[in-house]
Amino acid sequence: IWGGQVVAVLGVRHHDPMKYDDADQAKLERVAAQIAGPVAGALLRERDEALVRERVMLTGIGELMGGAPDLGSVFEEFTKQILKLVPFDEMAFLEIDHDRQVVKREHIFQDKRASRSRRLDPSEFSLAGTWVEKVSTSRQGVLRHSGSSEKTDKELPSPLPPAPGPNAGPRSGVMVPLIWGDEVTAAFWLKRDGENMFTEHDLALAERIAAQIAGPVVGWTARQRVVELAEERRKREAAELRAEALAEISETKSNFVSAVSHELRTPLTSIIAFADILNRRGDKDLDERPLQQVKVIQRNARRLEGLINELLDLSTMESGQFEIVRSTFDFASMIAESLESSELQFEALSQTVKLKMVTEVLPINGDRERLLQVVSILLNNASKYSPNGTEIEIEITADEEALTVEVRDRGPGIPDDRPEELFEMFHRADDELTRRVPGTGIGLHIAKRIIDEHGGEITIAPREGGGATARFWIPTGVNAQV
């Protein structure tokens, strides 16, 4: 005892439990009284020397961190210095992103001699309900023990995964905030396995370490964020420039397609008109062979006309000027017109069309010309992909709410997987037959856009027994939602 405080304990031990008596105890107390002063002085000197060594090491750590361009360049040396001050098995820096409410786990050390079956990698996790949140909110360090009988801090999710197995043994950890200004920008975490657990002294020492390294770590984090923001801005500006360039290219392409299409349409209109005149007068003025040649001209001219119209429609859609003009009309008469327009194509391939319709008059509200275009596209596809001499079926049903059209063919069918790809722009089924059949892959894309604008739906599915069924429905009422 020195100065009224117990500074140390002196004890002796013998294998014979009856060896010592009260007189021996009194002698030992007199010895303790004689050496108390020197022992207290020696202990005080040792404590002062330890504090001096600690201050020197903390100063060295501060200089090491302050002179480094980033943590990664000095992390190995930093780890060695910290191990001299407070031994540990695992260590990590935890950067706090308050805006996103997440924690970035970075710069991790794991003692290779420690037994564990997990590897810790840099990662990101939610701030809520973790040690990091508690440290950030309280601005104070946390000491936690587990796997022992000692009463400790309330259990919180660890920033690192727990050791594997139910009998992993006792573990302890300390976490302290890195405070700069008024904000906790990061946390410093240490973990130790085994019975030699962290103490309040270790927690206080970790807080002094945090005070030394907070400035450099915050500076590195701020610089890194500036670099990341600059990179994000650079990527965004580059993306905007690419978008502007693509928009300009798209506009130029649309203008070119529109100009060329109009230039082609003018002479084509004359070709179609004169071919129609020759066909109507063919029985009187032309022999059989010239008449068949006129029909070839008609058929190919109308195919070219359809292609030009599709290109113009595509240009209009890409420019955002595509519109649906609604009116009330008879869908049945529109079907008759579509079949009449496709007659030459069916005739050339010796194909027949079977029409099934519930009634002779089907009044609906929609864009007549656009819906006529959809039916023509489906009939044209059915004819192109069906063998010569086959039958194409078209069935129309309607009720008070919707009108449904189905076009069925006996062609090669379609793939079972992802049939929706057929409606993508310029997409064509990849097989030998489709490669032989002329087409641009535009028609179905345009048809889907028209049906979508009418508030309906269009699909294509394999047909039982071979072939495909194209089906679309649209609302019939004048108050249909578009």
Image (cartoon, rainbow, N blue to C red):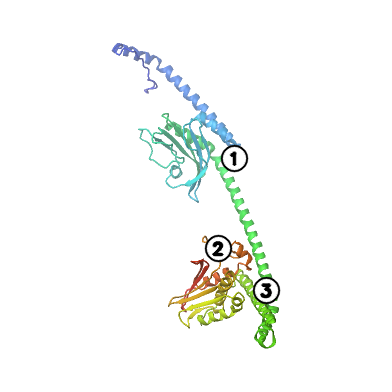
Amino acid found under the numbered disc labelled 2? Glu
Q: Earlier in the sequence, mark 2 or mark 1?
A: 1
Residue 261: numbered disc: 3
**Residue 70 bears which disc, if any?**
1
Residue type at mark 3: give it.
Ser
Estimate how packed mark 2 is, as few (under 14), some (14 to 19) or many (20 or more) residues with alpha carbons within 10 Å: some
The CA distance from mark 3 to mark 1 is 62 Å
* Marks 3 and 2 close (CB-CB < 8 Å): no
Choose the circle earlier in sequence order: 3 or 2: 3
Q: Is residue 116 above or below residue 24?
A: below
Q: Is residue 324 visible?
A: no
Q: Position of residue 94 (x, y in %)?
A: 50, 42
Between marks 3 and 2, how big is the CA–CA gap?
Answer: 27 Å
Residue at 52 percent of width and 26 percent of height: 53
Q: Which structural element holds mark 2?
A: helix
Q: Are marks 3 and 1 in contact (CB under 8 Å)?
A: no
Disc 1 crowd rating (10 Å Cα; few below 14, some 14-19, many 20+) is some
Locate residue 250, reporting x and y percent: 65, 66
Label 3 crowd (10 A; few <14 / some 14-19 / many >=20)? some
Between circles 2 and 1, the one closer to the viewer is 2
Is the Cβ of the residue at disc 2 closer than 8 Å to that at disc 1? no
Q: Which quadrant of the structure image shows residue 57?
A: top right
Q: Which mark is residue 421?
A: 2
